[in-house]
Structure formats: C-alpha cells, structure tokens
Image: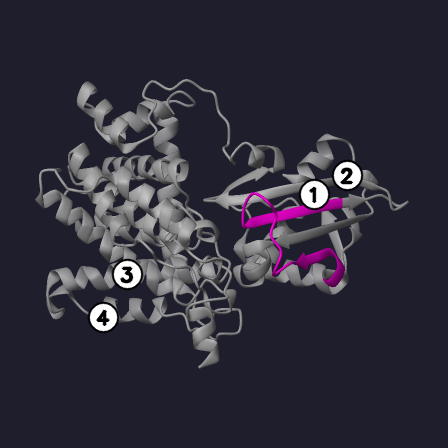
Amino acid sequence: MFVSALVDTGLLSQAARIKVELYGSLGATGKGHGSGPAILLGLEGHLPDTVDPDIIEPRSHEILNSGRILLMGEHELPFIEADDLVYHRQTSLPYHANGMTFTVWNTSGHQLVHKVYYSVGGGFVVDEEAAGADRIVEDSTSLPYSFSSAKELLEICEQTGLTIAEIMMANEQVWRTEAEVRQGILHIWQVMRDCVDRGIRQEGILPGGLKVKRRAPSLHRELKNRTRMDMITPSLGAMDWVNLYALAVNEENAAGGRVVTAPTNGAAGIIPAVLHYYYNFCPNSDEDGIVQFLLSAAAIGILFKENASISGAEVGCQGEVGSACAMAAAGLAEATGGSPRQVENAAEIGMEHNLGLTCDPIGGLVQVPCIERNAMASLKAINAAALALRGNGEHFVSLDKVIKTMRDTGRDMLDKYKETSRGGLAVNVIEC
C-alpha cells in the first residue's frame, strides 16, 4: 500500500531513504511472527497471494546482507536493518496494538512522506484516518440483506426462507456474479488444500530458535500406513486426520508459507482442517458444500469483526482461535444440512468454550502453543457442530451475547496476555 502510494504520487523516484517502525504487539512479537521479511518483500512489490514462499527467506537475507532494497522492484536505495527496521517493544500507537509507520526522505534529507498504518486483524489494514473512524473499512454499498447481529441474520432467514449461505451469496452478488463468487471460494479452498499438502511434505525444524520439529510429515506417513480398520474407532481415525490437517497448515504459517487468513494467520489451520474433515469424512460432501461452508463461516466472521475483534493483540487468542472455531463450527453445520438456528448455535458453542483464551506465544513465535491450539480448536469445532445438529437450534446463550462477552473479556484482559509475549507461557516456560 505504501510503495504503491509513492508510485501514484510520483515520489518513488525521489526516495533516498526509507524507515519502517513497528509498535505495540507488532514491535514485541514482529520478529517471531515474520513481520520483517513480510515488510521487506512488500516494499519490493510482492503480494501475499502471489509471492513464491520459497524466495521469501533468501531474498530477505539478500536485502539485509547487501544493505540495498528495490522499492516496487525498480527503485534501489540503501536499507540498513539496525536503522531502517525498528521494533518498538514497549511503545504503542494510539488506535491499535498492531501499529506501524513508514517514512521516506529525499537526497537532501527532506521528509517526503510519513504514513501510519494499523493491522487490525484478518488481513485488514487501515491508515490513520480510518483508524480515527473506529477502524472500520468503509463501504456504502447497499446490500439486499444487510445484518449487523446474529439476531438480525436469523430474522432475515425466517422472513425469506433462505439459508445463511444463500443470504451471503445474494449479498456477494452486489459486487460480482454468482459464478465469480463460486470460483473465488473454490480458489480459496484450493489454496487451503495446497497449504495442507505442502505442510505434509516439508520436513525439518521450524525457524526462530525454539527448535520445534515439524510433526505433520511423520504423522502423515503413520496415518497412510494404517487402514481405518486398524484404528480404534472411525471417529478417532478422523480425529487423527483433523489433527494432521491443522498441524500442516500452522507449521506452514510458522515457517512463512502461504496460508489463508481465516480469520487470522495465527488461527489459519482451523477452518481448513474442518473443511478437509467435511470433504473427506462426511457422506455426500461436494463442492456445493464447500461453497456453503465458507459462505456461512464468513457470515459469522463478519459478526465477530464488526461487534468485537479478531485480533489477538486486542482481545487475546479468544479473538483468533475462538472466532475461527465458531466460524468452522457454523460452516460445518451449514454444509451438513443444519438450519440457520442450528448454524448459529454451532457458532455460539464454538466461541463460548474459548472465552478467556490468552495469546501468550513463547518467544513471540507462532509455534507454542499456537500450532497445537489450532488442532484442539478444530476438534472442538466439529463437536460444536455435532452438538448443535443434535438439537433444534434452541439454546440458552445467544451468539450475540457470546460475542459481547468475548469483547468485554478482551477489554478486561491484561496486555501481557494479548500477543506481547510478556505473560503466561511466554514467560513461565523460559523462566523454568
């Protein structure tokens, strides 16, 4: 975004020095989260959905070792890591814990541009102006079925007779055709499958210094060598595969591979794992079910994003893994024929039993407890959908109340438990 703006304003050719500063949670855990290489490749014009993951590490090293960077791949200027990529571990910017600044000077030392951005979760980035407007990405497009709460969503379902997935599809068609929506969703599914496949193939130790060994490849070999009859029960056999899917994705995330932010990178394994479970283990699964799954999951994600947060730096891991668990549970309930009220119930169960979950990554790395946490939440999502489908959709606590509770819990949570690596496991394991 920043270097594109330099191009658009004609300032790229005048740039003689650039400095990037990371604040708050980004400053505290940015090194462990791979924020540095992401920024370097982004400044050179690469995009997350198209960059070759295999070039990220060597190109990052090349930039830092040579002390030269190519803005937008064309304008070379000096880049000294110690001076030009600064992590402020103890200082935060006003509007969000994930804040960063970009500053560019010309050859005379005159400041050309200074820009503030906030990464507010789920791949959403806003500038300082949008942050001042409560960090909402504004879009005034009129939708056929607008909703801002689960209560409103269920009322629309009852009034129209449409499912949650059908409502989402109708809304999406304001921007693109049904065929394009379907194609886009199935592309997301393919990226998830590619991520699992790559995670299964990659051996070795995850970067960062904790020396965490990748487990997905060995688990995959073990499961391939066992028939389902060899396993204790069919359900436990499926459980092993769900664990494999989640581990594979989150090991790829920890190693800087390509993942689908759903709803965040730290919780990226849950929806793919449950989606793989649906596709490989549920009777009559098909691509229509995949589309229904992701549309319904997206509806639930919208509710969390608009009414609480999906940022671990803002509300703890309940906002990441908890939201992902709720989204996956809703998607599975939808794809297997659940009613709108059963889908809402599944999401509520998935979130309710993640309330209070802290974000305390050891060493600032998205490895411990993050990788296993995704596997656990994937199984929890499947069970949440099963519980909801066994009922009639009637339940005591509404999804809206759970989302509000998550938001309130996040506000009350001490900052040391919100992706700063200054509390919980992050300090107790090291001290031991």
Front disc: 2 or 3? 3
- Could you tell me which secondary element the residue under label 4 belongs to? loop
Earlier residue among tags 3 and 4: 4
Kindly check if marks 1 and 4 are in contact, taking CB atoms under 8 A apart as contact: no
Which numbered mark, 2 or 4, is in the foreground of this view?
2
Is residue 205 in sight in this rendering?
no
Q: Earlier in the sequence, mark 1 or mark 4?
A: 1
Does residue 299 sit above or below 191 in this rendering? above
Query: What's the amino acid at mark 1?
Result: Met
Which residue shows up at 50% across the image and 32% down it? 137
Q: Which residue was labeled with disc 2?
A: 12
Q: Using the image, tell me which numbered label, if any, was put on residue 376.
A: 3
Q: Is residue 409 depicted above or below 126 in this figure?
A: below
- Badge 1 vs badge 2, beta-carbon distance below 8 Å: yes
The amino acid type found where label 4 is placed reads: Asn
Q: Is residue 131 left or right of residue 242?
A: right
Q: Amino acid at mark 2?
A: Leu
Mark 1, mark 2: which one is toward the viewer? 2
Q: For the residues labelled 2 and 4, say whether their Cβ atoms are less than 8 Å apart.
A: no
Give yes or no for contact between labels 3 and 4 (Cβ–Cβ under 8 Å).
no
Q: Nearer the viewer, residue 51 or 384?
A: 384
Q: Which of pointers 3 and 1 indicates the residue nearer the eye?
A: 3
Give percent across and percent down for residue 204: 45, 72
Q: Which mark is residue 72?
A: 1
Q: Is the residue marked by circle 1 packed among few (<14), some (14-19), or many (20+) residues within 10 Å?
A: some
Question: Residue at the spot x=41%, y=46% of the render?
Answer: 310
| Residue at 15% over, 37% down | 337
Q: Secondary structure at mark 1?
A: loop
Point out the stretch of residues depicted in magenta: 82-103
